[in-house]
Image: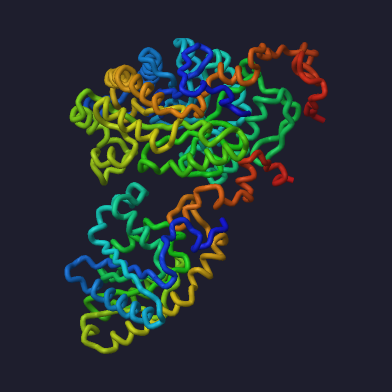
């Protein structure tokens, strides 16, 4: 699949509804439930889940393009089921794209990913994509019958299957990590028979970038908790391989970056307010100060202008890219403060970034991926396919051909029990 | 990965007759007897190289001023700041001279921490002289007991002669003779281009982390796309592995 076949003409801003955005701006959350170091309050799971819904809705209200949530299977995180959460948010929103950061491609059965995210994609009317990652929490693997030492081949193999499940009505498949499939149809078929866009996330693994490039999918670097620029070699490698596989030029590769921001109108207030949360959060290198950490890593702390400047440096370093997400709700920051942060992000940071990035943007850079864009790339002005199943033949299956328009040459061979 | 050291992007252009010696000194006092020992070894090695018509260039990495960055790198996992320059000196080193004081019957923790933050493949087949200073001759085995295994792990080529100096050795001509012996060994290993022969042609046979400092093979030409994982990434299958 090649995305990006329809770019705006050189030097021309096209605001017609048919055209997608150049860069999508949004937020991502890891769904941690953390004690607020100021008040000592630890939210309950119920409180935090409710707060996250408000955060997602707020993201749309302030004009952001993307809300993404992570997947975890252990406290102190709540988000074990991103498709359930995102489907609910989809019902409360109209415009924002819902995504993950990340969906575990290792410990989930790719068949369940195919089914659940296609379902969520339908409910969200196409406003859904996903980012795949391996997950680094060791015990999660054995809880789901897997082994972290096989994490990389597992991730690669699982995606190879997922890719087919969303593109072929009937799949026969055999691999090392999962029971074989015979005559399997993943339901529902993706909305408009166009699979959700997939980003492959990695912080250090060229094989993951290679897979993203091979399929012409997006590549996402979380761009946090490491020195600024740490992720550049991997992004550049992905761009080279994207071009190698004939999906477009290196410039047309589809790159997403993470980041993390804490904003206040005055820089010193941002540092002062954020410091207790930084000092307490276990994810940072506490051998250096917040100021040094913000200087050395993509963590953006300061006035709206400082956040803008730092983000523009990402663009300078990585080239034109398609998606910028920030973590804004972690480490015990109270809901009220997070919502204020989103006001500042949506009103004072993102509008300026849109303008400044557009001014510098190469006319050859791909537009950000959307369902509408993918439908247009696949069908042009034609009608999207809407699969209608054949009749139940009495044993709750449709026989050798699942849909009325399924190519009859592809006959399913069902497994039998002897 | 087919690059040889001469083609590696990080190898600076230089005249063919220059060889780079890098001193890693873990002594922190001023004057430091470890640094003094390192300077004598470096000077003697430089003489040996010059005698063979090779131009020696000596750089010194004093670990004391880098102590903060080394500690940060241990915590964060990422060398930064001036530490990156020190790593880069080692990338380009033709020979290394390591000196450490003996503290509490062992090598300096600062030296161990510095080695800990280096990529595993950074010093493969790099000739190294191992040296230590101590307050008592009773620590003489620290080099063989601790430095040799450490540099064996790094797959460096430790000179057969190591140099240990207790207080009484500084007035003993035998120390000068040992320094001369070690310098001869280091110069011989450098002049015979052992590092190029081993790490150049055999580079693929060692384990590497992608994007490491030694040969940042971060672009397509340097990558091996023929591995099982790379083939799986490009739409391959694990199905055969089950049958």
Query: How far from the left and from the top, in percent, is residue B138?
Result: 27, 79
Picture layout, residue A397 above or below residue B64 = above
Residue farthest toward the bottom in the current orientation of the protein = B173
Name the foreground residue: B91 vs A251.
A251
Q: Going 63% across and 30% down the picture, which residue do you hit? A: A162
Picture layout, residue B92 above or below residue A57 = below
A41 horizontally vs B155: left or right: left
In what quadrant of the picture does the N terminus of chain A appear? top right
Residue farthest toward the front in the current orientation of the protein = A11
Quadrant in which residue A115 is drawn: top right
Query: How far from the left and from the top, in percent, is residue A414?
Result: 78, 26
Picture layout, residue A377 above or below residue A93 = below
Name the foreground residue: A342 vs A239.
A239
Query: How far from the left and from the top, in percent, is residue A322?
Result: 47, 27
In what quadrant of the picture does the C terminus of chain A appear? top right
Quadrant in which residue B35 is drawn: bottom left
Q: Going 60% across and 33% down the picture, which residue do you hit? A: A247
* Count of numbered marks: 0
Name the foreground residue: A268 vs A8.
A8
Q: Is residue A29 visible?
A: no
Query: How far from the left and from the top, in percent, is residue A79?
Result: 45, 25
Q: Going 75% across and 27% down the picture, which residue do you hit? A: A183
Quadrant in which residue A297 is drawn: top left
Picture layout, residue B166 above or below residue A47 = below
Q: Is residue B18 visible?
A: yes
B85 horizontally vs A266: left or right: right
């Amino acid at each position: 699949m090649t995305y990006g076949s329809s770019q705006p003409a050189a030097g021309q801003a096209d605001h017609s509804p048919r055209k997608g955005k150049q860069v999508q701006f949004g937020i991502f959350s890891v769904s941690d439930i953390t004690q607020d170091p100021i008040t000592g309050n630890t939210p309950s799971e119920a409180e935090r889940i409710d707060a996250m819904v408000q955060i997602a809705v707020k993201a749309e209200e302030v004009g952001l393009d993307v809300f993404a949530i992570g997947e975890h299977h252990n406290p102190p995180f709540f988000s074990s089921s991103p498709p359930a959460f995102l489907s609910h948010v989809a019902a409360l929103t109209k415009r924002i794209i819902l995504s993950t950061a990340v969906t575990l491609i290792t410990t989930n059965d790719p068949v369940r990913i195919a089914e659940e995210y296609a379902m969520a994609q339908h409910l969200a009317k196409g406003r859904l994509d996903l980012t795949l990652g391996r997950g680094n929490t060791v015990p999660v693997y054995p809880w789901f019958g897997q082994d972290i030492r096989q994490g990389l081949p597992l991730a690669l193999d699982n995606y190879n299957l997922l890719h087919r499940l969303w593109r072929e009505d009937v799949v026969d498949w055999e691999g090392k990590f999962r029971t074989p499939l015979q005559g399997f149809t993943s339901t529902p078929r993706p909305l408009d028979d166009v699979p959700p866009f997939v980003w492959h996330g990695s912080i250090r693994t060229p094989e993951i970038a290679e897979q993203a490039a091979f399929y012409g999918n997006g590549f996402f670097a979380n761009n946090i908790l490491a020195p600024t620029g740490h992720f550049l070699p991997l992004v550049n490698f992905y761009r080279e391989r994207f071009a190698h596989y004939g999906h477009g030029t290196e410039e047309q590769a589809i790159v997403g970056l993470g980041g993390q921001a804490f904003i206040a109108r005055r820089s010193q207030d941002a540092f002062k307010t954020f410091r207790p949360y930084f000092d307490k959060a276990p994810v940072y290198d506490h051998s250096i100060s917040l100021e040094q950490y913000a200087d050395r890593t993509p963590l953006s702390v300061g006035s709206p202008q400082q956040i803008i400047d730092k983000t523009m440096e990402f663009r300078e370093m990585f080239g034109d890219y398609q998606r910028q997400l920030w973590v804004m709700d972690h480490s015990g920051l109270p809901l009220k403060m997070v919502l204020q942060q989103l006001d500042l992000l949506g009103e004072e940071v993102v509008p300026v970034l849109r303008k400044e990035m557009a001014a510098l943007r190469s006319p050859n850079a791909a537009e950000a991926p959307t369902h509408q864009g993918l439908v247009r790339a696949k069908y042009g002005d034609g009608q999207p396919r809407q699969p209608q199943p054949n009749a139940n033949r009495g044993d709750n299956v449709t026989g050798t051909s699942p849909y009325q328009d399924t190519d009859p040459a592809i006959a399913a061979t069902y497994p039998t029990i002897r | 990965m087919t690059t040889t050291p001469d083609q590696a992007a990080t190898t600076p252009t230089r005249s063919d007759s220059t060889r780079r010696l890098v001193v890693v000194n873990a002594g922190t006092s001023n004057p430091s007897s470890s640094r003094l020992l390192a300077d004598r070894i470096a000077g003697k090695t430089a003489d040996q190289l010059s005698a063979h018509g090779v131009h020696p260039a000596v750089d010194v990495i004093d670990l004391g001023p880098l102590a903060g960055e080394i500690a940060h790198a241990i915590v964060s996992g990422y060398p930064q700041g001036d530490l990156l320059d020190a790593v880069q000196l080692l990338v380009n080193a033709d020979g290394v001279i390591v000196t450490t004081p003996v503290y509490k019957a062992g090598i300096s923790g600062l030296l161990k921490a510095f080695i800990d933050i280096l990529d595993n493949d950074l010093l493969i087949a790099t000739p190294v002289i191992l040296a230590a200073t101590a307050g008592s001759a009773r620590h003489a085995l620290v080099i063989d007991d601790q430095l040799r295994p450490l540099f064996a792990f790094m797959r460096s080529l430790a000179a057969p002669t190591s140099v240990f100096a207790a207080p009484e050795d500084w007035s003993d001509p035998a120390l000068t003779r040992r320094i001369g012996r070690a310098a001869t060994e280091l110069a011989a290993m450098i002049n015979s281009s052992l590092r190029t022969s081993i790490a150049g042609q055999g580079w693929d046979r060692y384990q590497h982390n992608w994007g490491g400092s030694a040969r940042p093979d971060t672009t397509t030409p340097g990558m091996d796309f023929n591995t099982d994982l790379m083939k799986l990434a490009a739409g391959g299958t694990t199905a055969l592995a089950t049958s």
